[in-house]
């Protein structure tokens, strides 16, 4: 049995102890909620907002995120590549994404604003026209990634090999150009 919930606000709920009801959540807000080790698979979130939530090691199998915003959330050890890819649309504001996989997803126009993206797997991900505004990308993997028209001008600690990624018309700052030359082990001063 699944639920349909619309225009609700959920505050300080602990879904690591009490399971979130399976169903569809439309235009809902989740604030200061815990989803640690939670199974939120087969749920649909449409135009929802997650604020100050902790999603460490949650299960997103076949979960739909359609026009969903994450603000100041902790996202650790997540497999977004297990989500339902149909109409997937995500936006991240001031989030910590550590050891997260976006493997083979289409994330065109996705915005990452002031995020720590540490050891994030973007292998074979389509990030066309994505925006990485003031993001720390240390240890993140870009391999066979589509980065055409993506904006990295204010981001740092990335390592992107132009020979194995599509970077046509991507934007980089002069200071960040070192992140494109790392494999050549040259010194830029």
Image (spheres, rainbow, N blue to C red):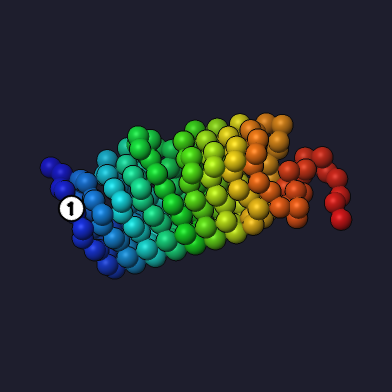
The quadrant in which the N terminus is found is top left
Give residue 18's position: percent from left, percent from top: 23, 58
- Nearer to me, 113 or 40: 113
Is residue 77 visible to the viewer in this orientation of the structure? yes
Which secondary structure lies at badge 1? strand
Give residue 25's position: percent from left, percent from top: 23, 50
Q: Give the number of marks.
A: 1
Give residue 124's position: percent from left, percent from top: 55, 32
- Nearer to me, 165 or 62: 165
- Nearer to me, 118 or 160: 160
Farthest residue, direction left: 1
Is residue 139 visible to the viewer in this orientation of the structure? no
Give residue 51's position: percent from left, percent from top: 37, 63
Circle 1 is placed at which residue position? 5
Image point (64%, 57%), residue name: 154
| Left or right for 111, reference 170 | left
Q: Where 154 sits versus 165, above or below?
A: below
């Amino acid at each position: 049995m699944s639920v349909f919930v619309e225009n609700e606000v959920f505050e300080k709920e602990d879904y690591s102890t009490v399971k979130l009801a399976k169903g569809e959540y439309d235009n809902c807000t989740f604030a200061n909620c815990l989803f640690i080790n939670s199974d939120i698979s087969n749920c649909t979130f449409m135009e929802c907002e997650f604020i100050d939530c902790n999603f460490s090691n949650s299960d997103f199998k076949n979960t739909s995120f359609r026009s969903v915003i994450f603000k100041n959330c902790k996202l650790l050890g997540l497999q977004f590549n297990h989500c339902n890819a149909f109409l997937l649309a995500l936006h991240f504001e001031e989030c910590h994404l550590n050891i997260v996989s976006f493997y083979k997803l289409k994330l065109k126009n996705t915005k990452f604003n002031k995020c720590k993206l540490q050891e994030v797997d973007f292998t074979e991900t389509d990030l066309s026209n994505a925006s990485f505004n003031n993001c720390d990308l240390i240890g993140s993997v870009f391999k066979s990634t589509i980065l055409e028209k993506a904006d990295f001008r204010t981001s740092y600690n990335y390592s992107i090999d132009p020979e194995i990624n599509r970077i046509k018309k991507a934007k980089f700052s002069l200071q960040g150009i070192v992140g494109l030359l790392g494999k050549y082990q040259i010194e830029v001063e």
